[in-house]
Amino acid sequence: MQPVRHADLPSTDVPGTDLPGTGPERVSPEAEYRSVVNPAPRRRQSIGVKVGAVTIGGGHPIVVQSMTNTDTADALGTVRQVQALAAAGSELVRITVNTEEAARQIGRIRELLDAAGCRVPLIGDFHYNGHLLLTRYPDCAEGLAKYRINPGNVGFKHKRDSQFATMIETAIRYDRPVRIGVNWGSLDGELLTRMMDDNARLSEPRDAREVTREALIVSALESARRAEAIGLARDHIVLSCKVSGVQDLIAVYTDLGARCDYALHLGLTEAGMGSKGIVASAAGLAILLQQGIGDTIRISLTPEPGGDRTTEVIVAQEILQTMGFRSFTPLVTACPGCGRTTSTVFQELADKIQSFVRSQMPIWGERYVGVEDMSLAVMGCVVNGPGESKHADIGISLPGTGEVPAAPVFIDGEKAMTLRGEGIAEEFQRIVEEYVERRYARRA
Ligand code: SF4
């Protein structure tokens, strides 16, 4: 089951129903935001690259991808995590291929995923020995939909070119695209030294950080040119230049985006844990995405020990959705709460409803057209509650401290009913379910 459709952006062609304001003319606030307030932010033109059934770049919707942190040699553990990431909405999943045992398991992992109905394309992440693993294990080369090559880790001195060439030739033989993924932490040392030396000879040398940023771009572009010279088609190449600082990321990708038309994989590397990782990723990516730069994104969050790996997928989706690029899951607008609402009822309701909607999406997404555009509001008191609720498809305004214990519910901007007493959460959940059923057309 694919909970997130890639190619078909949600339609705003809503069928008529008997609910107030839900005729064909009504467009959900979420869809309106995307199409009117923020009319399809202009994207940098890039060459589309097919990775299995998913296309990166070429004007296609920005693709969400993620990476496992299981030992790939543990096929069952890896399959379980790939399934979880795909179910959360990851449209591509990258896995480490670092040892012979890992390479040996790729074919089996692919088979197990296919048998379970999970068709998400797998990307192999190679460092140091990719040329050997791809050559020795044909099932590995075949089972992967894309190979990630890090030019800084492909080999050293005279071996580097031949090992890089072997990987590119394998990609050509199996008709697979590659990502040439340069990383700040593993930048080609020889290239950097050469560029630093050249810089030192200038009458006005540039700042060392600037030279390093330039070296990242040169490494990516030179590697791409070499891959093309070997025979890899231009529409089989994705580039990335990952750094861990927000300002560096913006500078590097702005420059890289202007100097080529390859599809770009965007992400802050080693973003970090928790709110720091989320904030840093969102800050850097938002600016670049708004400039039209970025064809696929990955949020490199460090999970808490034993934490859920799928958080990186949800963060990636929410960046794209809150910016109006794509819709994945109905999002709940909730007020922060203040002294006017001292109980936790509305916080619990907002949390319950968001979790409920997210858990329903794999089913709703398969069944209904455009449901991901639905907007909900859960508000804490009468000050902004009714107003904000009216802007949502469905909103509820809970009673603040000292207010009459009643919670008006607004549907399509009109007050539809008032909930009272215990069980408001369950009742509101049922109203949401009924709304989805009536409002959204069933898929053919
Ligand atoms: S809606 Fe009411 S409870 Fe919520 S932040 Fe505003 S004033 Fe406070």
Image (spheres, rainbow, N blue to C red):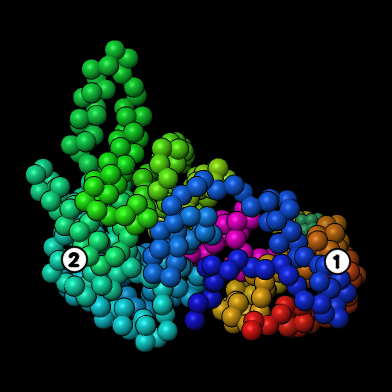
Residue 339 picture quarter: bottom right
Q: Quadrant of ligand 1?
A: bottom right
Category of crowding for the residue at label 2, using alpha-carbon neighbours closer than 10 angstroms: few (below 14), some (14–19), many (at least 20) = many
Residue marked by disc 2:
134
214 relative to 95, above or below: above
What numbered label is drawn on residue 204?
A: none
The amino acid on which the numbered mark 1 sits, given as a three-letter code, is Gly
Q: Residue at x 22, y 65 (%)?
A: 173
Q: Position of residue 279 (x, y in %)?
A: 52, 50
Callout 1 crowding tier (Cα within 10 Å): few <14, some 14–19, many ≥20: some
Residue 354's image quarter? Answer: bottom right
Query: Residue 367, image x and y in percent?
Result: 63, 82
**Disc marking residue 413:** 1
Q: Is residue 328 magenta?
A: yes
Considering the image in quadrants, where does the C terminus appear? bottom right
Decide if residue 368 is on the left or right side of residue 398: left
Q: Secondary structure at mark 2?
A: helix
Q: Is residue 73 above or below residue 280?
A: below
Q: Which residues are magenta?
A: 311-334
**Residue 306 in view (yes/no):** no
Secondary structure at numbered mark 1: loop
Give the foreground label among 1 and 2.
2
Is residue 166 shown left or right of residue 308?
Answer: left
